Image (cartoon, rainbow, N blue to C red):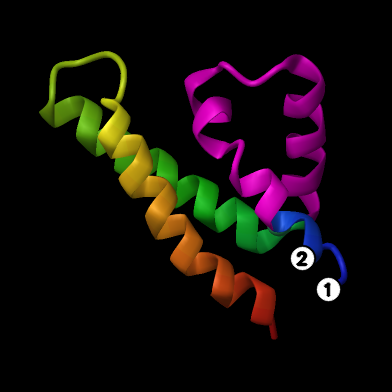
Amino acid sequence: MDEHGHCKDYLKNFCDFIDGELPAELCEQLKAHLAECTNCTIILETLKRTINIYQSTAESERLPEDVHSRLLARLKLDDDWITKGS
Ligand SMILES: [Zn+2]
């Protein structure tokens, strides 16, 4: 899949997308990409679930900065997997 080259760009926006802080234009682009990219859809679902767990265990409405960083660090590990593709 040639689209995989763009995945990293979209991955960077996932946290903002979930937080509802992504600008509308980028949001639409991301949704369009998700419609075609199974990898990103899976990662987004995983990320959402992870955030839900954090939010239900911690009472804070927003993720602390270090949690964001850790999630992004994990996504970077997954980048390798995405780039290789199949
Ligand atoms: Zn993708």
Rendered position, 45 above or below 54: below
Residue 75, how many percent across, how many down? 47, 57
Image-based side of 41 in relation to 68, left or right: right
Vertical side of 18 occupied by 68: above or below: below
Query: Which of the image's four quarters has the C terminus?
Result: bottom right
Question: Dot 1, crowdedness within 10 Å: few (<14), some or many (≥20)?
Answer: few
Residue 29, image x and y in percent?
82, 34
Does residue 57 appear to the left or right of 23 in the view shown? left
Q: Percent x, y for residue 79?
A: 57, 66
Q: Is residue 23 above or below residue 42?
A: above
Give the farthest residue toward the bottom. Answer: 86
Say if 69 sits above or below 63 in the image.
below
Q: Quadrant of residue 26?
A: top right
The type of residue carrying mark 1 is Met
User: Magenta segment, which residues?
Assistant: 8-36
Q: Main secondary structure of the magenta part?
A: helix
Q: For residue 17, which quarter of the picture?
A: top right
Residue tagged by mark 2?
4
20 part of magenta stretch: yes
- Image label count: 2
Q: Label 1, secondary structure: give it.
A: loop
Spatial CA distance of label 1 from label 2 is 6 Å
Q: Which residue is mark 1?
A: 1
Q: In this rendering, would 8 be left or right of 32?
A: left
At horizontal 49% and vertical 67% (from top left) the residue drawn is: 78
Please state which amino acid type lies under the numbered disc 2: His
Asked if residue 7 is among those painted magenta in the image, a careful observer would answer no
Q: Are marks 1 and 2 in contact (CB under 8 Å)?
A: yes
Give the position of the N terminus as an image quadrant.
bottom right
Q: Position of residue 9 (x, y in %)?
A: 71, 48
Indicate if the residue with disc 2 has its beta carbon within 8 Å of ligand 1: yes
